[in-house]
Amino acid sequence: MIVEVKTSVTARPTLRRQRLRRSIQRIGLVDQATAHEAADFLHASQGDGLHPVFATPQAVVGTVLVCPQKRINQALLADYTHVIGLEDCLKFIRRRMKKYATEKEASRLMFPDELIQFLAWEAGLPE
């Protein structure tokens, strides 16, 4: 997943073509020519309101907007392949932490972020 972080709830996708190319190439799922094709497609699709997605047999490349669910700007929904609320992200992380509590407990101090350490610790608490 390639994500561009925006702090504004009215932000339109503004990924630069060269940055998209490098990012898609770095993932290594497609060859260089296909990475350029995907980047060109996504760059040209920005703001057209058609849920841009580029698919090959090896990969699906699209755009993601993560924002607080209560602040989703409805006009932007069509400009992104997926829109995910922060609340959904937190639910997903908590479910994973619970499901793999033993594994996460053992490695919780390897996460430099205090929030992830807290979520790993929280998952190990009895209900």
Image (tube, rainbow, N blue to C red):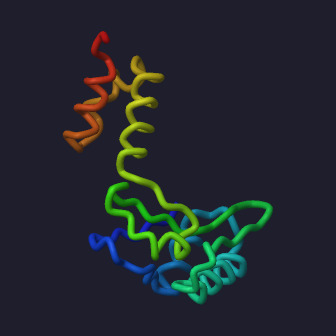
Residue 70 appears in which quarter of the rendering? Answer: bottom left
What count of labels does the image hold? 0
Find residue 113 and report its horizontal and vertical position in percent. 23, 44
Residue 106 appears in which quarter of the rendering? Answer: top left
**Would you place residue 19 above or below residue 65 in this image?**
below
Instruction: Please tell me which residue lies in front, 55 or 19.
Output: 55
Q: Is residue 25 left or right of residue 67?
A: right
Q: Residue furthest right?
A: 57
**Would you place residue 95 above or below residue 5 in this image?**
above
Q: What's the residue at 54%, 62% (across, down)?
A: 82
Q: What's the residue at 65%, 84% (across, down)?
A: 41
Instruction: Please tell me which residue lies in front, 22 or 85.
Output: 85
Find residue 110 and report its horizontal and vertical position in percent. 29, 35
Looking at the rendered image, the quarter that the C terminus falls into is top left
Q: What's the residue at 60%, 85% (across, down)?
A: 45
Q: In this view, does 37 lie to the left or right of 116?
A: right
**Would you place residue 54 above or below residue 70 in this image?**
below
Residue 54 appears in which quarter of the rendering? Answer: bottom right
Q: Which residue lies furthest to the left in this view?
A: 114
Find residue 29 and report its horizontal and vertical position in percent. 67, 62
**Would you place residue 100 above or below residue 35 in this image?**
above
Q: What's the residue at 36%, 78% (across, down)?
A: 11
Q: In this view, does 29 lie to the left or right of 119?
A: right
